[in-house]
Image (tube, rainbow, N blue to C red):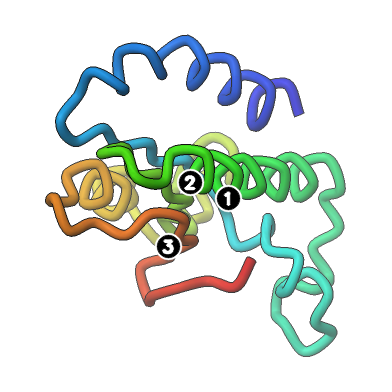
Amino acid sequence: METNFIGTLAVTQAMLPLLRKSQAGRIVNLATTLGSLTINGDPSSPYYSSRLIGYNASKAALNMLTVQLAAELKGTPIVVNSVCPGYVKTDLTGNSGFMTPEEGARLPVEYALLGQDAVSGCFVEPDGDTPW
C-alpha cells in the first residue's frame, strides 16, 4: 500500500504544481488487471483466483486515485490514466512474464506522450480498455 498508493499519491501531490504550469501534463499510473474490482469479482475471470490481497487492494486504490485525479483536473491540460502494461518479466514476477521490460514500457510511454486530444480517466491494457 505504501509503494503502490501512498507513494504515488505523495509524488503526484508534490509534482502537481509543476504539472499545472505545463501545456500538456500527463500522469500515467502503472496499474494491473489485478486492481480491477470488476475482474476480481468475476468468477469466470482467469484472475479470480489471484488472492494477493495487499497487492490487489493497493492497485485498486491506485485506480481510485486515477479516477479522483481525472475528475479533479477536468478542464485542465493535465490528463490522468491508469495503464496496465501486461505481464512483464521482472523480479516481481520471478521473470515469468510474457513481455520484456522494453515491451512492457510501450503502453505507459504511449500514454505519457498523448496529444492535446487525449482522454483522461481511462484504465487500459495493451488489448484496450479494462473495467474498473
Badge 1 element: helix
Q: Residues within 10 Å of mark 1 (few under 14, many from 20)?
A: some
- Numbered label attached to residue 70: 2
Relative placement, left or right, of 110 versus 122 is left
| Image quadrant where residue 36 sits | bottom right
Q: Residue at x 30, y 13 (%)?
A: 18
Where is residue 104 shown, x and y percent of the image?
34, 51
Query: Of the residues tagged 2 and 3, which is closer to the observer?
Result: 2
**Label 3: which residue?**
98
Task: Compute the Cα span from label 2 to label 3.
Answer: 30 Å
Three-letter amino acid code at disc 2? Ala
Q: Secondary structure at mark 3?
A: loop
**Element on which disc 2 rests:** helix
In the image, what residue occupies the spot 25% across and 42% down? Answer: 112
Kind of residue at disc 1: Val
Please tell me in which quadrant of the rendered image residue 4 appears: top right
Picture mark count? 3
**Is residue 122 toward the left or the right of residue 10 in the image?**
left
Return the residue at label 1. 67
